[in-house]
Structure formats: C-alpha cells, structure tokens
Amino acid sequence: MPAALLLAVALAVAPSPAPVGPDSLRSDGEVRATVLRHASDVRRCYQDEGLRRNPGLMGHVELELTILPTGRVDSVTVSAISLRGDGVKEVTTCLARTARQWRFERGAYLVEQVVFPFVFAPGPGAAGGPSTRADE
C-alpha cells in the first residue's frame, strides 16, 4: 500500500499537461466491503440451491468478476470449484447471477478483474445454518 501512496504523490507532483485518465484500482478494503455486504446473498445461494439438494455439499468456489469503472459488474466466471454432487450447477448459477447485480464504487478506475474465493460448509448438525467465508 505504501507504493500506491508514493505513486499518487508522484503523479500529483509530476508536471503533466495531458489529463490523467483512469489509472487506479479500487482498494482491497473497498472491494472486500462490497462483497461482504452481499454475504447473505451468497449464503442464500448455497443454502437454497445447494444444501436443499445435497445436505453434505461443501467445498470452495472462486468467482472471477470483471468490474467496470462505473462500478457495474460486467461479467462473472466461475474460475475454480471443488464442490461436487447434486446442487453444484444450481449454486454456481445462482452465485453468478447474484454477483452480476453487485455494485462497486464508481470512479476513475481501470476495468478490473478480481477473484473471490468462497468456502462453503454445512453448519454444525443438520439443523445448523451453512458456514460461508469470503477469503481474499
């Protein structure tokens, strides 16, 4: 992070007659906060689409999002998956559909591709809720 701060200071000081275009990335904290705001949607996909069909469904899913400077998610791809069995297709379809609705901060950003790993495991006991983690 200090390198990003030094770059911003250098750009502010360097004489440049040309306007500076989008050349920055969203902060990890801002991206993480946006994803965490939607944790209940991710959990719902896993619970409603996965655990309903397969109570023992567990593993990880990595979603690769392409985020536009407007903050809109342009595309979502499931880039890795370890879930196996009934409910996997439904969970991944729900996750991709849900993630396409997420909105990130608008700004002078580049088009970004970010990968979010989600780890899914049923909660303790059959009556427990699912455990969902968004790691970075």
Image (cartoon, rainbow, N blue to C red):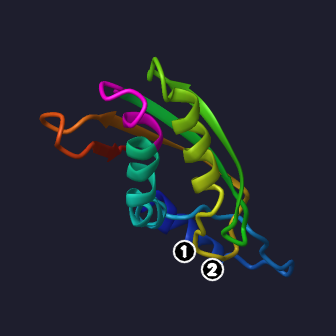
Mark 2: secondary structure: helix
Q: Is residue 1 magenta?
A: no
- Frontmost residue, 1 versus 7: 1
Please report the residue visible at 38 percent of the width from the left and 59 percent of the height from the top.
40
Measure how far apart labels 2 and 1 are at the Cα level: 5 Å
Q: Amino acid at mark 1?
A: Val
According to the picture, the residue beneath numbered tag 2 turns out to be 12
Please report the residue visible at 49 percent of the width from the left and 29 percent of the height from the top.
87
Q: Amino acid at mark 2?
A: Ala
Q: Residues within 10 Å of mark 1 (few under 14, many from 20)?
A: few
Q: Is residue 67 above or below residue 87?
A: below
Q: Position of residue 81 (x, y in %)?
A: 50, 25
Please report the residue visible at 23 percent of the width from the left and 46 percent of the height from the top.
129
Q: Is residue 56 magenta?
A: yes
Q: Position of residue 29 (x, y in %)?
A: 40, 63
Q: Is residue 67 above or below residue 121?
A: below
